Amino acid sequence: MLFEKNKNALTLSSLGNRIAIIGCSSSGKSTLADRLSTELKIPVFHLDFYAHQHNSNWIRVSDADLIEQHKKILHNNAWIIEGNYSVCMDERLDLATTVIWIDPNVWGAAWRFTFRNFNKSNRVGKLPGAKTDFSWAMVKWILFNYPKNRSNYIIKIQNRPNLNVIHLQTLKQLDELQYLLFNMSNSNPYS
């Protein structure tokens, strides 16, 4: 389902208790995940924390280590997992009750990435102890690699026809979703 077609039916309870949030870097995945975690009282897991060594400049752990940590997360009865990492995405999508795919224009995402890194904020999802967040390699990934991954995400989602999918293609749609979920849905189904 696309957001535009079913937005009137969206409530916090309609998301279920296993929510995967995927999408472009700097699109708002971490912020949305933390907000959902607070509202639903479901633990949030930022995959960047498991895919990179803490207190480093985003040095990647091995795929085997990430997969092992990801499997441990999936054993929880309820979770909000934020991040992509195709090496372990299939297992997550198989168990998810809802996938929220934040898929804005990559030029806007690259601008947001640059702005947030020069803003020196203590942003949600920041790797603990990271010496720096900005890298030209990440800008390049946002602009050139992420668009190539879109087709893989579409295939993964289409292979799961019963999966509840919210595909947000603009940041305005993300704002609308948050308004609907957090201002229109006042009851927490899991408390």
Image: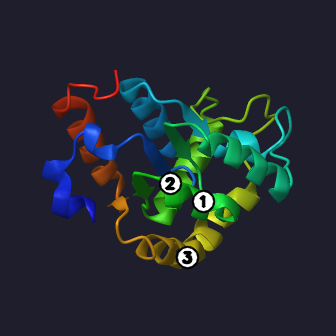
Q: Which residue is mark 3?
A: 152
Which residue appears at 36% of the width and 52% of the height? 171
Q: Position of residue 128 (x, y in %)?
A: 74, 29
Q: Position of residue 86 (x, y in %)?
A: 65, 64
Q: Which residue is mark 1?
A: 91
| Marks 3, 1: nearer the viewer | 1
| Marks 2, 3: nearer the viewer | 2
Q: Earlier in the sequence, mark 2 or mark 3?
A: 2
Q: Which residue is most to the left?
A: 8
Mark 3–mark 1 CB contact (< 8 Å): no
The span from disc 3 to disc 1 (Cα, nearest Å) is 15 Å
Q: Nearer the viewer, residue 168 or 161?
A: 161
Q: Is residue 27 left or right of residue 139?
A: left
When the figure is inspected, residue 188 is found, relative to residue 60, above or below; the finding is: above
What's the residue type where badge 2 is placed? Leu
Q: Secondary structure at mark 1?
A: helix
Q: Is residue 112 left or right of residue 191?
A: right
What's the residue type where badge 1 is placed? Glu
Residue 24 appears in the figure = no
Q: Position of residue 105 (x, y in %)?
A: 44, 64
For label 1, count other residues whose C-alpha is less than 10 Å away and answer few (under 14), some (14-19) or many (20+).
some
Q: Earlier in the sequence, mark 3 or mark 1?
A: 1
What's the residue type where badge 3 is placed? Asn
Mark 1–mark 2 CB contact (< 8 Å): yes
Disc assigned to residue 95: 2
Q: Nearer the viewer, residue 79 or 113?
A: 79
Disc assigned to residue 76: none
Q: Position of residue 175 (x, y in %)?
A: 30, 44
